Amino acid sequence: MSTFGQKARRLEKARLLLRRRYGEAPKAMVTHPVEHVLRTILSEEATPSQVEQAMNRLRQEFVDWNDLRVSRPREIRETLGAEFPRAAEKARVIPRLLDQVFKRHNSMVWDFLEQLGKVAARAYFESLEEVRPFVAATIARDCAGAHAFPVDRDVARALGRLHVLDPDAQSETEMQAMLERAVKHTRAYESHWLLKRLAEDLCLVQTPVCSQCPLRKMCPSAVVAPKGRARRPKRARAAKPKKKAATKRAARRRRVAKRKRSRRSPGKKR
């Protein structure tokens, strides 16, 4: 079982390897907190293109985000589409979250976040019903500058396969607390962004693409076909030593014959 220090070093090594693959993480630019929280919820187990397509469908189907707030989960689920990951769960959570915030502030403009501190912003969203800890951590980090390491199912899956987290034994809150201790504030956003990219691109739910993963050599769960030349048939392997010995005997006979010829030939006069 790995110690906390070993896990912290593994996280840092993973960050450096993933940075070579994906480059530097873009800075978090939150101009619309409501849209940001919608993308956060939709992004779990979904690709960025799926999220953007879903956001476009929501804009087309509903008049505005307040209309989305008062809509039924069934309508939202149908708009997301049957193929969208965890559509039913997300369709239930989205209007519930928006409605709770609206009833507290009577507004769909979340300017109240500007007045909250880092700890208060996180506690505010954690107090809402049916809001997962990773959503509260994301909003506190991106909108209030808090030191947070959100752990949704994607990040938990990737770090679980790396044996850094144990999603079966740890809660989201426990996993986030561990990562926030293990990763420095200045590296937390980049580490999270890189791991999220890995989970979306390669460390998939059903069929992870381990052969293309930059972490395959350090991942205990990686399944990669062994590389190298195919083994020769047993008969061919057995014949090789015999062939080598015959080659040595032939070379020895040539050397002996050469020495005999040199003895029979007359020496050179000086």
Image (spheres, helix red, strand yellow):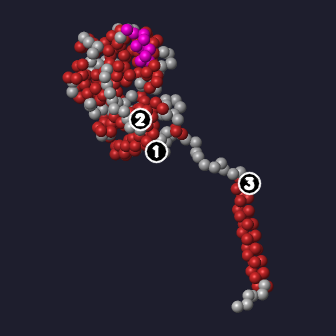
Mark 3: amino acid: Arg
Q: Could one spot residue 86 in this view of the protein?
A: no
Say which label, 3 or 1, has the lower sequence index. Answer: 1
Report how far apart the C-alphas of labels 3 and 1 lie in the structure: 37 Å
Say which label, 3 or 2, has the lower sequence index. Answer: 2
Residue under numbered circle 2:
195
**In the picture, residue 129 is in which quadrant?**
top left
Mark 2: amino acid: Leu
Report how far apart the C-alphas of labels 2 and 1 lie in the structure: 14 Å
Q: Secondary structure at mark 2?
A: helix
- Which range is magenta? 54-63
Q: Residue at x 75, y 88 (%)?
A: 267
Q: Tell which of 156 and 99 is nearer to you.
A: 99
Say which label, 2 or 1, has the lower sequence index. Answer: 2
| In this rendering, the label closer to the viewer, 3 or 1 | 1
Residue under numbered circle 3:
235
